[in-house]
Amino acid sequence: MEKTIHWESKTLLSELNQGKELAKQLMNHLHPSSSHETREFLVEKILSSYEKALSSLNWGAHVGEPKPSSNLLESPSSFANGSPWSEGSDQDSKHKDVSKKRKTLMPRWTEQMKVRSGTGLEGPLGDGYSWRKYGQKDILGANFPRSYYRCSHRHGQGCLATKQVQKSEEDPTIFEVTYKGRHTCSQASRLNMAAATVIEERLKEKKSHFHPQQRQHEEKPLEEIVSMPGAGLMVKTEDLDTREDDVFPYFSFPTTPIGSENVDNNIFSEAILESNFCMGSLSPTFISPATSDSNMFSLSPCHMNSYGLGHNVQTSESDLTDIISAPTSVPNSPIGNLDLSLDLDPDFPFDIREFFS
DNA sequence: ATCATTTGACCATG
DNA sequence: CATGGTCAAATGAT
């Protein structure tokens, strides 16, 4: 069996290496003079490599798991109007029996994203979902309040996804976004479109000029910017509920496009976002000096929820909260200068913003 | 008028 | 009891 593992890690390595090389090539083709097709081609190749690598991980890592990763083939329509998670639509009956306080079997994960308001790039990007703010609270020991959002389709579609947004104390340009629950609403498919659009826009922006569309109103960005999945971030999975056995590092992301219909931009952005996620969570990167939390683990599971797709991530209950503590902040270090030393180390500072900005 | 945000109060939890 | 999370009335925006 060791052989198998070996073989797989070899495959993995070679795929990753290939991806690396391709990425390098892509970098060289980032000049406006380079043809769009070339870039597209390279991107596709990269994605392909990653997919292979990932699927190899999938097969190798968790055999005894309840599910492979074929869930993405399921059409989202299956839960169009009834969230599979909210059995008894508890939304009305909040006062009901609190007796069984199921710790909300909702997955929870945190992302940290840097807002670069200087460049006008990290504008008011959404994450493709529409949220409604329902509260704000000052948090003890924190300099900035925490905002609470819920999916605006909660009423219509019973979507229970929520998120919390809070400015990082150390670096106010960083927002910590904690998502709870997945979207059961039909917005999910829009995500990719939105992201793709965003990317395109950025490209355009980059090419032409930058217009100071947004100045720093200091407070304003927070509510809006909040969370573009592909933004700088680390993903910290928290409530993974690994009470029992493994269920731990859980790879489940679409290796297949959801609707194989409009597979152009969608895949593109989707895959990019995902790889970004994964990279983010895999990178022990820079242990922020800010975090006084002595040790951080260097390996965090890539818990891909992919927004409404992977509804299999079943969470039992337990507080695994601090296992995975991703590096909190992107340091002020010269990453900004595209320090893409794409070496196959876990530090891989993969950040599409750097590519597209 | 409708919809979203703000904000203090209320509630659950540890 | 302190804290974090949510509700809902008031307020603001469109």
Image (cartoon, coloured by chain):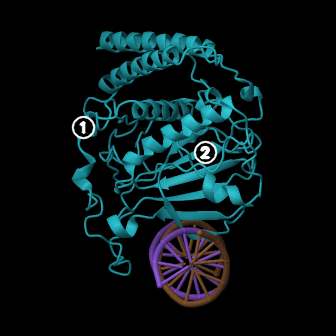
Chain colours: A cyan, B purple, C brown
Q: Nearer the viewer, residue A108 or A167?
A: A167
The residue most toward the front is: A208
Under mark 2, the amino acid is Gln
Picture quadrant of residue A348: top right
Number of dots carrying numbers: 2
Q: Are marks 2 and 1 in contact (CB under 8 Å)?
A: no
Residue C3 at x, y percent in the picture = 63, 69
Please rate how many residues cluster around mark 1, counting C-alpha atoms within 10 Å: few if below 14, some from 14 to 19, many from 20.
some
Q: Quadrant of the N terminus of chain A?
A: top left
Q: Label 2 neighbourhood size at 10 Å, few (<14), some (14-19), many (20+)?
A: many
Residue A123: x percent and y percent? 66, 47
Q: Chain of mark 1?
A: A
Where residue A283 appears, as percent x and y from the top left, is 57, 29
Foreground residue among A229 and A333: A229
Q: Mark number for residue A112? A: 2
Mark 2 residue element:
strand
Q: CA distance from mark 2 to mark 1?
A: 29 Å
Q: Image check: A85 left or right of A332?
A: left
**A350 or A357: which is nearer to us?**
A357
Horizontal relation, residue A32 to residue A56: left or right: right
Marks 2 & 1 on one chain: yes
The residue indicated by pointer 1 is A73
**Mark found first going from the N terminus, 2 or 1:** 1
Mark 1: which secondary structure? Answer: helix
